[in-house]
Image: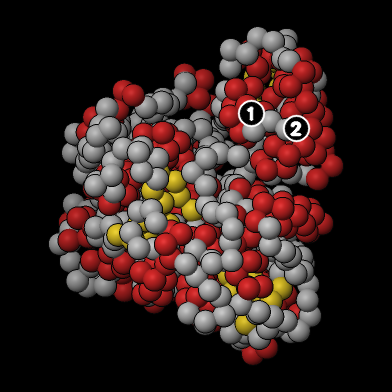
């Protein structure tokens, strides 16, 4: 298993950098991921999407459909790409500390 | 490009067998002809080279492939491999595919006719490693040497001597996932040799004997599906909740009442979508809801594990998992008392339950199963739904999912629909049973470990992307909206990766989607287009 340093701590990650220990996530982890994608400040909008993704995942064991994310946050897809350079699945889920979506999605 | 000998597979220890040079791949038409404009093929990092088994082509599809700690462990794996080989060749252990495997091992005439049929080999610029005969011939020689009496001596005398060592088996493992199992080679073979099957059986050996299988197919694939209900992790209550949400969304956006039935005992039809469609391409399941309701069909979805996720990755790598999933699907249909099962738009899903599982589904589990394309054809031509084909006034081409078309022989139904509903429908060249695989076949479309996606979009999907672009050569630019109809979830996932990598939406205004969406888009009752080239 690959290891990665985020905000001064070591974490187990997959080969694409997604955290494997969801419960060790902190807000600093999200900031550290963001910095790696050259986003140096997390705004209210970032947190709204990240917190929603995370709480939905913890409740349902899966990330929400993009459509639901758009509906709940009110951000359209291009706004989501503005906030998260590699998009909701590759960036936002990663920053929220949940595993990479798999299984025909 | 480096010439490879069959015996090279066993040589060189941990060193990489070949390099992939993007400049040697088959060229794409403009504006996709400049490799430097695209994100680029991710090279393995020093750290990854240290940690991972990467002795094939600089691509890793399975990071968890174990590295043996010592010679004894290496030997243990080699012994397991030989034991697996024996099982593949015995009827007690390979009741599923023994006969075609034996015939395919015996009858290859080494004519290499199949090479010109393989989209991966062609797309790679004819790289020897991806020759559709390379892997099977190594497999054949290993069988001859290690399983047949006197094989070792004969191998020495004939010069066909391939050493079975740690390097050989790990390279063979990775190489078994450099094939789409599209079986275009099989169709081209004058002797009927099935190189796709040999590759699939090799994967089976690795999975059933050594426990090596891509995590997306096994651990997070069939295992997760059998456990929580879906390889996506979608649980029954969340599936129902998502569809309810979608029903409301689409009722609002279309102005017609969209209502998806669940768990209706005694319905005529059990429809099983891919759960991935519900999550990633919700227009597809919603289109089916709209169509089935408009045609007045008696139908239902099931929320029983795993009755709402029709995928069966076992077909790609493992007979045991294949049987478990297929049996559960049939049992759910039996319990509901439906007259038939229809799988959603997904090639392997249709093939798995309709034909591959046929010998397992006996007696009360032998419930009629219908191919999704004939189902839609009957629906469109039933006269129960009114259409206005002028609504589909944009260029459309059709991708033939290998499992629906070449491997199940369903060619015309989807074309009858398109000729009726899409005035600007045009075929790709070649098409029908001659189609090229999307590049995601054989389970590859769901695999994305390490840098595997780069290989899929650069090599495996290259010939398909080229022919899609060529089908729209009369409107190459973004001025005209164009639609690639790909009636298969796995194909759509591959097209999503390819279109994103090359920027096909921006450069060519090209989108992809299923068949159901196109049909709904042409329904006379729809006030607004169902399809959209704009993002949400």
In the picture, the quarter occupied by the C terminus of chain B is top right
Q: Which image quadrant is residue B308 in? A: bottom right
Q: Position of residue A44 (x, y in %)?
A: 77, 18
Crowding around mark 1 (Cα neighbors within 10 Å: few <14, some 14 to 19, many 20+) is: many
Q: Which residue is mark 2?
A: A73
Q: Which residue is mark 1?
A: A80
Give yes or no for contact between labels 1 and 2 (Cβ–Cβ under 8 Å).
Answer: yes
In this image, B203 relative to B69: left or right? left
Q: Please tell me which residue is depicted at 59% across the width and 58% down the height of the picture.
A: B527
In this image, B349 relative to B156: left or right? right
- Assign a secondary structure to mark 2: helix
In this image, A41 relative to B369: left or right? right
Q: Nearer the viewer, residue B286 or B385?
A: B385
Q: What chain is tagged by disc 2?
A: A
Q: Please tell me which residue is depicted at 70% across the width and 37% down the height of the picture.
A: A70
- Assign a secondary structure to mark 1: helix
Q: Nearer the viewer, residue B71 or B243?
A: B243
């Amino acid at each position: 298993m690959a290891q990665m340093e985020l905000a001064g701590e070591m974490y187990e990650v997959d080969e694409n950098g997604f955290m494997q220990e969801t419960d060790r996530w902190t807000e600093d982890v999200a900031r550290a991921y963001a910095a790696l994608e050259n986003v140096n400040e997390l705004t209210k909008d970032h947190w709204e999407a990240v917190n929603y993704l995370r709480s939905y995942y913890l409740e349902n064991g899966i990330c929400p459909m993009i459509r639901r994310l758009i509906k709940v946050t009110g951000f359209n897809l291009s706004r989501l790409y503005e906030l998260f350079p590699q998009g909701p699945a590759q960036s936002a889920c990663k920053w929220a500390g949940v595993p990479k979506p798999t299984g025909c999605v | 490009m480096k010439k490879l000998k069959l015996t090279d597979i066993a040589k060189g220890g941990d060193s990489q067998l070949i390099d992939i040079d993007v400049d040697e791949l088959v060229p794409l038409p403009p504006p996709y002809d400049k490799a430097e404009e695209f994100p680029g093929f991710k090279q393995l990092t020093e750290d990854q080279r240290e940690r991972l088994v990467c002795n094939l082509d600089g691509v890793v599809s399975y990071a968890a492939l174990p590295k043996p700690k010592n010679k004894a462990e290496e030997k243990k794996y080699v012994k397991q491999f030989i034991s697996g080989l024996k099982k593949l060749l015995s009827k007690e252990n390979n009741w599923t595919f023994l006969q075609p495997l034996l015939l395919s091992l015996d009858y290859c005439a080494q004519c290499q006719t199949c090479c010109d049929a393989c989209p991966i080999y062609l797309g790679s610029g004819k790289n020897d490693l991806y020759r559709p005969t390379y892997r099977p011939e190594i497999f054949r020689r290993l069988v001859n040497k290690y399983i047949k009496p006197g094989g070792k001596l004969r191998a020495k005398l004939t010069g066909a001597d391939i050493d079975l060592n740690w390097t050989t088996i790990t390279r063979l493992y990775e190489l078994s996932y450099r094939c789409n199992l599209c079986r275009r080679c099989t169709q081209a073979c004058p002797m009927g040799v099935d190189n796709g099957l040999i590759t699939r059986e090799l994967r089976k050996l690795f999975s059933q004997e050594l426990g090596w299988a891509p995590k997306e197919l096994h651990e997070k694939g069939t295992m997760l599906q059998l456990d929580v209900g879906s390889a996506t992790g979608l649980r029954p209550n969340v599936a129902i909740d998502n569809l309810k949400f979608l029903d409301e969304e689409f009722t609002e956006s279309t102005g017609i009442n969209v209502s998806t039935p669940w768990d209706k005992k005694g319905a005529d039809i059990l429809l099983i979508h891919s759960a991935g469609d519900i999550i990633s391409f919700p227009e597809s399941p919603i289109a089916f809801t709209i169509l089935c309701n408009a045609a007045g069909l008696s139908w239902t979805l099931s929320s029983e594990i795993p009755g709402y996720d029709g995928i069966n990755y076992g077909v790609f790598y493992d007979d045991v998992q294949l049987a478990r999933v297929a049996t559960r699907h049939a049992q759910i249909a039996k319990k509901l008392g439906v007259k038939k099962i229809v799988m959603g738009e997904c090639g392997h899903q249709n093939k798995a339950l309709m034909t591959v599982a046929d010998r397992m589904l006996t007696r009360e589990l032998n419930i009629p199963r219908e191919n999704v394309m004939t189902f839609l054809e009957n629906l469109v031509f039933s006269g129960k739904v009114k259409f206005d084909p002028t609504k589909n006034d944009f260029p459309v081409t059709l991708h033939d999912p290998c499992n629906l078309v070449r491997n199940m022989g369903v060619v015309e139904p989807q074309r009858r629909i398109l000729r009726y509903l899409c005035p600007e429908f045009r075929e790709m060249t070649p098409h029908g049973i001659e189609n090229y695989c999307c590049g995601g076949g054989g389970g590859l479309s769901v695999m994305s470990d390490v840098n595997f996606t780069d290989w899929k979009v650069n090599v495996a999907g290259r010939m398909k992307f080229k022919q899609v672009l060529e089908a729209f050569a009369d409107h190459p630019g973004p001025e005209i909206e164009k639609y690639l109809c790909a009636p298969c979830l796995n194909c759509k996932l591959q097209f999503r990766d390819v279109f994103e990598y090359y920027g096909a939406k921006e450069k060519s205004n090209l989108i992809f989607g299923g068949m159901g969406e196109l049909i709904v888009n042409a329904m006379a009752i729809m006030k607004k287009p169902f399809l959209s080239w704009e993002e949400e």
